[in-house]
Amino acid sequence: MKKKWGLFLLLVLLTACQQKEDINLDDIFNMKFEVRELEGVNEQGTTFQTGELKGEVWLANFIFTNCDTVCPPMTANMARVQRHLKEVGLEDVRIVSFSIDPEYDTPDKLIEYGNLFDADFSNWDFVTGYTQQEIERFANISFLVPAAKIEGSNQFTHTTAMYLIDKDGFARESYSGTDLEVELIEEGIKRIKGNK
């Protein structure tokens, strides 16, 4: 009788392991946008390339430091996400905030901006160093969202969403950057990592 139970438990464990490996992200998430290649520099002046994030799970959003509306609360919320992920053992998830005002947002300005929100730069990159045309095209094509300067103003139109990108470089989910749902973000990350 003990041998039968042992065999049963072994089969259950093997089945559970098999199910974990066979997760099809297309069945879990409604979104699958390929994040295109973009090269710039981060707040430290270090070269940054989206292609180098292949194999990692990461979160992305669009901000600019001169923003007088949604960017400060969005960045504060991303900082909350970063702290939460550390608390639950998901500190290896990268965070990338792309500036949509690369002419104004130098690395020094991005460090200053990140420090306002106690950003941990060890896994959070604030990226600039590309042209205005490149970042607009990147947002339009990779995430199907607008990113454009408002005529006669120093302000920009852009999405307020946070995006979850899988290990193969596909945006899989968007979350509100203003009405924060930390647990949903955690759940999405765990599903991509195969932990749930």
Image (cartoon, helix red, strand yellow):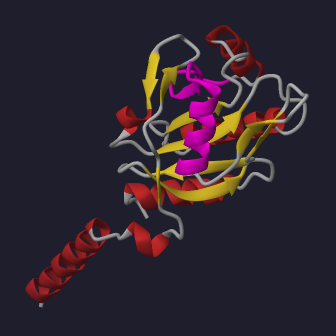
Quarter of the C terminus within the rendering? bottom left
Q: Residue at x 45, y 62 (%)?
A: 191
Name which residue lies at 74% across and 19% down: 113
Image position, residue 186 (x, y; %): 57, 54
- Residue 97 visible in rendering: no
- 68 shown above or below 142: above
Question: Would you say residue 132 sits in the magenta stretch?
Answer: yes
Q: Is residue 74 left or right of residue 125?
A: right
- Asked where in the image residue 11 lies, by quadrant, the reply is bottom left
Q: Look at the image and tell me in which quarter the N terminus lies.
A: bottom left
Residue 7 in percent (x, y) is at: 12, 82
In the image shown, does 112 or 90 lie closer to the viewer? 112
Per the rendered image, the range of residues in magenta is 119-142
**Position of residue 111 measured from the top left corner of the image (x, y, whole percent):** 66, 14
Q: Position of residue 140 (x, y in %)?
A: 61, 48
Give the residue at x 56% y 23%.
130
Closer to the camera, 171 or 40?
40
Q: Give the quadrant of residue 47.
A: top left
Considering only vertical position in the picture, is 9 above or below 71? below
Farthest residue, direction left: 3
Q: Along the line of sight, which residue is nearer the eye, 149 or 74?
A: 149
Left or right of 87, for residue 37 = left
Q: Which one is in front, 48 or 132?
A: 132
Vertical relation: 14 (above or below) 140: below
Instruction: Tell me if residue 156 is in the magenta stretch.
Output: no
Q: Name the residue: 67% across, 55% down.
A: 175
